[in-house]
Image (cartoon, rainbow, N blue to C red):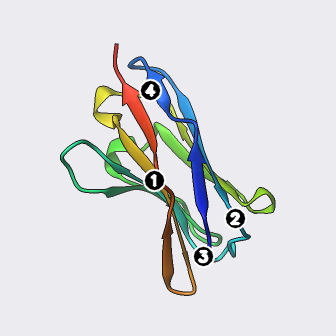
């Protein structure tokens, strides 16, 4: 069973940057997608960005041009570089992987954007 561990969350001022990391306990095939989701207080968990080989990364409209997802398969790690952060980006960010039809989730890392 794949385990995912996120890190990199914290408190940042509006306009600031953070980089989230997610390390998998075992290799994930590059053809299998990895993604970042987020859940704001009182709201549903939603997709932020997804990456898999052979396809362009996907982003939700609200983060397009500000967030970048990347992946290092050798390190079993997926990253989310977040720039120009806004208060609306405040949420718990979850790493997701799907392998052999099974969904795996990390426990989440909190990002708070506030002055």
Which of the marked residues, 2 or 1, is nearer the chain's N terminus? 2
Between the C-alphas of marks 4 and 1, the distance is: 20 Å
Q: How many residues crowd around disc 3 within 10 Å: few (fewer than 14), some, or many (20 or more)? A: some
Q: Which residue is mark 2?
A: 25
Which of the marked residues, 3 or 2, is nearer the chain's N terminus? 2
Q: How many residues crowd around disc 1 within 10 Å: few (fewer than 14), some, or many (20 or more)? A: many
Rendered view: 9 above or below 76 = above
Which residue does the image show at 37% across and 25% down from the upper left? 113
Is residue 18 found left or right of 14 in the rendered image? right
Which of the marked residues, 4 or 1, is nearer the chain's N terminus? 4
Label 3 or label 4, whichever lies nearer to me, is 3
Which of the marked residues, 3 or 4, is nearer the chain's N terminus? 3
Rendered view: 53 above or below 14 = below
> Residue lying furthest bottom in this view?
100
Q: Which residue is mark 4?
A: 84
User: Which quarter of the rendered picture does the C terminus lie within?
Assistant: top left
As helix, strand or loop, the secondary structure at mark 4 comes to loop
Between the C-alphas of marks 3 and 2, the distance is: 15 Å
User: Can you give x and y, in whole percent of width and height, for residue 50 in the image?
Assistant: 50, 61
User: Can you give x and y, in whole percent of width and height, for residue 56 in the image?
Assistant: 55, 63
Q: Which residue is mark 1?
A: 94
């Amino acid at each position: 069973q794949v385990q995912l561990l996120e890190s990199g969350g914290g408190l940042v001022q509006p306009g600031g940057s953070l980089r989230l990391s997610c390390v998998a306990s075992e290799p994930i095939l590059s053809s299998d997608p990895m993604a970042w989701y987020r859940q704001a207080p009182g709201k549903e968990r939603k997709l932020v960005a997804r990456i898999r080989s052979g396809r362009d990364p996907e982003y939700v409209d609200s983060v397009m041009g500000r967030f970048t997802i990347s992946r290092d398969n050798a390190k079993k790690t997926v990253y989310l570089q977040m720039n120009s952060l806004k208060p609306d980006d405040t949420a718990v960010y979850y790493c997701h992987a799907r392998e052999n039809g099974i969904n795996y989730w990390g426990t989440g890392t909190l990002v708070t954007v506030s002055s």
